[in-house]
Amino acid sequence: MSSQKKLDPLRDFLDAVVSRIEALEAHCGISMSKSASTHGSSSNAMQKAPSVKHLTGAGDAPALKAFDKFLNGSVYKLADTCDDLEMGDLGKLLTEVFGGMRYVILLAAKSKQPDDMMDLQPHLTPITEYVTKIRALRLNRDFDSHMKAINEMLACVSWVTCRAPSILPATFVKECIGASDFWSNRIRKDFKGQEGDKAELHLQYCDGMKKVLQDLATYIDENHKTGLTFNPKGVSLAEAAIVLTDNPLTEAAATATRRNDQKVHKRASLVGNTVKGGNMASMVAELAGRRTEDGSSAATGLKKVTKDMQTWRKEFKDHGKAPTVVVQPPQTKKEEKKKKKKGLPILEYQERGTKWVIENQDKESAMITGENGILVVDVTDPKEQVYVFNCEEVTIKVNGGKLKSVVIDTCIKVNIIFDTIISGCEIVNSQKIAVQCDGVCPVFTIDKTVGVTIWLSEDSSKTSSFTTSMSSEMNVNIPEGDDRKEVPIPEQFVHKFAQGSLTSEVSDLYH
C-alpha cells in the first residue's frame, strides 16, 4: 500500500477536526477563515437571529404546521381587532406572546425530551417577557374589563409546562375560558343592543378571545395530548437551542459535523495504526497545505508544549526519570439548589376581594412592570388590601393613604412602604424583609420569618404591637429626637415555674 493511501484515514480525521473547529469558531464569534466565507459574509455568519421569525429547519413538523394555521385563523385576527379598537401595542405584544409559544414548539420538534422539564424554563423567556409587558399596559379606563379578560386568557400560555397525569394541557386551556368569559360577559353587557362599527368591534374582541382559547385547546388535543411533544430522534435541548439561536446557516454546518463524526468513529482504529507507521513528512506537508492566508491552521489555538513538558530533553535525561506531574483532584462544588419554579409575574387589582395581588416578581420583571424598578400600587379605597407572594429583590410603594391590610408571604429581600393600615401587617415564611410605616399600623404579625426590619413613624411607635412566632433577627427602628434608635425584638426567653404556674421573662441579653 502506498504512503498516500496510508494517510487517507488520517486525512479524514483531520477533516473532521477542522470542521469541528470551524463550527466552534462560528458559534463563539471568532473570525472565520476564508474557506468559511464561501457560505456568506463574516458579519452575516456571526449575526444572531433569536427571533422566531428567522427560525428555519423544522417547518415540516406537523405540529408546527398546525400551529401556524392556528395563528393565522385565530391569533392574528384577535390582534387586528385590538388594533382596530386602538388598544395601544396590545395587538403587537399578543402576536409576540404566541410567537414565543411557536419557538417552544419548534424547539421541542428538534430535540429529545429533557430528563428534567425544568430545563425548558429558560426557553420560556420570549413568552413571559411579552406577557409581563401586556400586564404593564396602561390604557384608558374604558378598557379595564378588556385588559382583565385578556390577562385571564393569557394564563393559557402555561400549557407548555403541563404534562399527564398531573394535568392535561388541553384541559388546562379550557379552564381559562371561564375566567376570561367572566370579564368578556361584562363587555358584552355594556355594548349589547348598541349599533355601529365600534360596538361590533368590542363584541368581536370578546368572541376572538374565546375562539383563541377554543382553537388552542383543539390544537393541543390533536398534537400534544399528554404534554408538549418532543422528537425522540432529535438532539439534546441545549444543542437544539444553539442551532435555533444562531444563523440558520450553522444548522447545515452542524449536519456536516455529525456526518464527519460518523466517519471518524468508523475509522478510529485505522487512524492509530497510520500515525504509528505512516510517513511523517507527508503528514507535515498535509498540515502545511491547510495553512490559510492569515497563517491560521487546524492547530491554531491549541495548547503549546513548554520546555518543562518535553521529557526527551537532556536536562530530564541527566536526572534519570522524568519528573512526575501531580494531578490535583478536581474540586467538587456543591450542587446549587435549583430555584423554586416561579409563575408569570403579576401586578393587578382583583375586584373580588378588593385585593391588589403582586406575585412572582423579581428584579428583572420589576424593571419592566414598575417605575424605575419600583412596583407602585395606588389605593383608592380603605377596604383594599395588598397581598405580596413569592417575590424576590423588589421594592413596593403603596400610595393613597389608608388601606385595610398588607400580607407578605414567601418572599425574599422585599422592601415595602405604606402609609396607614387599619387592620395590620402580616409577614410569613419570608427572609430579609424591610417594612416602612409612614402613618400608623396597629399590629405587626411575624411568623416563620428570618430577618425583619421595621421602620416606624413617631405616631406608630406609640401604638404598634408585635406578635411573633418561630422567627429571628427582628429589629424595630423608632424615632429618637432627630435620630433613630434600633431596638431588637427578643428571640430568647427564660421560663420558670412559680406557685404551679409557668412564667416567662425576656432574657438578660436584651437588658
Image: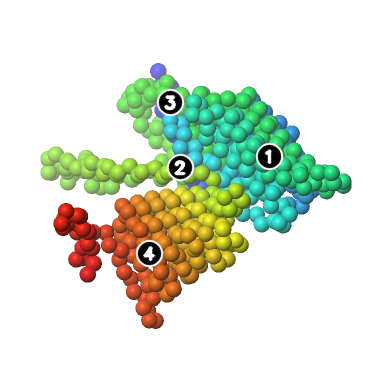
- Residue 220 shows in this picture: yes
Q: Sort mark 3 into few (<14), some (14-19) or many (20+) by Cα contacts within 10 Å.
A: many
From the viewer's side, name the closer residue of 28 and 275: 28
* Amino acid at pointer 4: Ser
The residue pinned by badge 4 equals 465
Mark 3 to mark 2: distance in Å?
42 Å
Question: N-terminal of the two: label 2 or label 1?
Answer: 1
Question: N-terminal of the two: label 1 or label 4?
Answer: 1
Query: Residue 181 has which mark?
Result: 1
Query: Residue 341 has which mark?
Result: 2
Query: Which residue sits furthest top?
Result: 1
Q: Is residue 424 above or below residue 200?
A: below
Numbered disc 2: secondary structure: loop
Residue 286: x and y, percent? 44, 34
Residue 30 located left or right of residue 182: left
Numbered disc 4: secondary structure: strand
* Amino acid at pointer 3: Val
Query: Which residue sits furthest right?
Result: 196
The residue pinned by badge 3 equals 264
